[in-house]
Image (cartoon, rainbow, N blue to C red):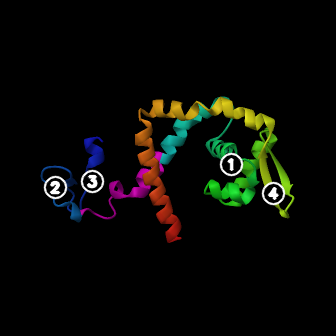
Amino acid sequence: MTQTAQQSTVADGSVAGSDDAPAVDTVDPLALEAQVCLALSAAARALVGTYRTLLEPLGLTHPQYLAMLALWQDGPMSLVRLAARLHLEPATTSPLVKRLEARGLVARRTDTRDERALVIELTDAGAAMREQAVGIPGAMLERLGLDAEEVAHVRDAALVVLDACERAD
């Protein structure tokens, strides 16, 4: 971590982490650098941007890639379940699925057990795309300069925050 990343502005204007800084408990609660939301938001944007060049050859956006990952892992599922797996609303997931369907990667069909529900399933082309995507996680580790253990630690910390936010809602 760089010295700048370790420092934060405190209430009297000095910088926490410097030799003349007051105790950490006096950190201004509204200091931009103290906000977990800024760090997570900026990291998410940067991460998606890093994925972009790896996903372009597949013609996928990052949300589409996540949907394909869920379908490759779990197989056919309802639109509602896919939305839940992606931590999205069904109304947000539906247009994403329609774009994948227009590309011939997934098919939507009515659930035989519940005519009101849609089931999303991979087409042969969608299933075949998995072979093209299999190198993406390793390429991301290489681009980030992180090892699998470091990425797992970051993912687990993000999941703790996600779980806490979902409980708070």
Image side of residue 112 versus residue 155, left or right? right
Q: Position of residue 119 (x, y in %)?
A: 79, 54
Cα–Cα gap, marks 4 and 3: 49 Å
Q: Position of residue 26 (x, y in %)?
A: 22, 64
133, above or below 36, in the image: above
From the image, which quarter does the N terminus lie in? top left
- Disc 4 is placed on an element classified as strand
Magenta stretch bounds: 27-43
Counting every numbered tag in the picture gives 4
Residue designated by label 1? 74
Residue designated by label 4? 118
Residue designated by label 2? 21
Q: Residue at x 44, y 34 (%)?
A: 144
**Lower sequence index among marks 3 and 2:** 3
Q: Residue at x 67, y 37 (%)?
A: 60
Cα–Cα gap, marks 2 and 4: 58 Å
Q: Amino acid at mark 3?
A: Ser
